[in-house]
Amino acid sequence: MNVRFREIIGNLNEQLNFINLEIDDPIEQCEKSIEIIVLTVENLKTQISKKKFKSQEEEIKFFKEIKPQFTSKLIYYNKIYKIETKKPRGGRRVVKKYYREELQKLKRFFDYELEFYKYYRTGSTYLDYKYFVRGNFDIKLSLDSLYFESDLSFATLHSYKVAKIMANDLLEVFIENKLQETSNNYRQKSQRKPNSALTWTGSKVALIELLYALHSQGVFNNGATDLKDIALYFESVFNINLGQYRRTFLEIRIRKTNRTKFINSLKESLVKRMDDTDF
């Protein structure tokens, strides 16, 4: 990928990850994320309007591989926003039914676009000159009305479909996680709570760092406990929502310095306490 585009997508991912760490409410998360993505896509559009592709291959690469990375995020967060704002207020069965229906909508999309889905997933290229070159369209190739409503200087026949496939892959994971959370929350409510409630008052990132450290050490059930089970237990005991803790761990992992910041501070605090204790 062109270095310039790599920097743009990198900056966008950093901003989105920061929002994910700082905001727990999914609706507010989506609102902030969509604002940033729209600005980034507009910036991308401005750059492309000033750029002449050196070859048809370069144009295909942009509309097949680069632009969908941006527009897929817009589709993803916009869809989550709609799902969460329309979620019914009801019991576990009502909510689970709602999420299952959303999964069915994704399946219908893949069934409807099966021919292109196979083309894209198998890495085929023989129709790229029609799918991903501006101005080249064939009415016989299953056109979306959205294509004609788009700015054709910044759109190709199937670039949006690639973005939607990418977004729907993420949405499937999101909805399945929501279904799992719904079941787990129900089980947790039916379990006896400790008499003394503890609320985690440190940062969410610190607890996630601790979560991964304890799981890596295998200190629960001789190392046989799944990470998500420990995360759910932490959320219940410490009265905190860890959100998308796997994405947060990725952020911790790519820190340039002091990747185990909280673990290091724990050690320093404990050593200091030992040194200061009178025997």
Image (tube, helix red, strand yellow):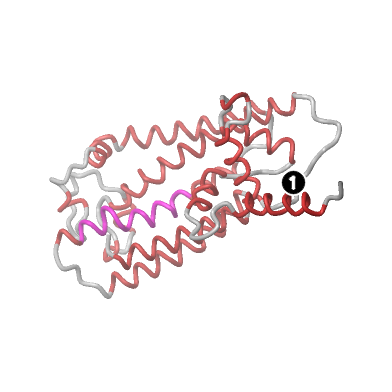
Q: Is residue 236 visible?
A: yes
Toward which corner of the image does residue 259 lie, by quadrant? Answer: bottom right
Q: Is residue 193 above or below residue 41?
A: above
Mark 1: amino acid: Trp
Specify the farthest residue to the front: 279
In front of the other: 8 or 140: 8
For residue 209, side relative to residue 116 (left or right): right
In front of the other: 134 or 178: 178
Label 1: how many Cα within 10 Å (few below 14, some 14–19, many 20+): some
In front of the other: 166 or 184: 184
For residue 233, side relative to residue 257 (left or right): right
**Which residue is identified by label 1?**
200
Residue 103 image position (x, y, % from top left)? 47, 33
Is 69 included in the stretch rendered in magenta?
Answer: yes
Q: Which residues are magenta?
A: 59-76
Image point (18%, 42%), residue name: 124
Q: Is residue 94 visible?
A: no
For residue 78, side relative to residue 202 (left or right): left
Residue 137 image position (x, y, % from top left)? 19, 53
Q: Main secondary structure of the magenta part?
A: helix
For residue 171, side relative to residue 216 (left or right): left
Image point (60%, 51%), residue name: 27
Image point (49%, 35%), residue name: 102
Image point (38%, 33%), residue name: 108
Is 89 included in the stretch rendered in magenta?
Answer: no
Toward which corner of the image does residue 136 lie, by quadrant? Answer: bottom left
Residue 207 image position (x, y, % from top left)? 65, 46
Residue 150 image position (x, y, % from top left)? 33, 60
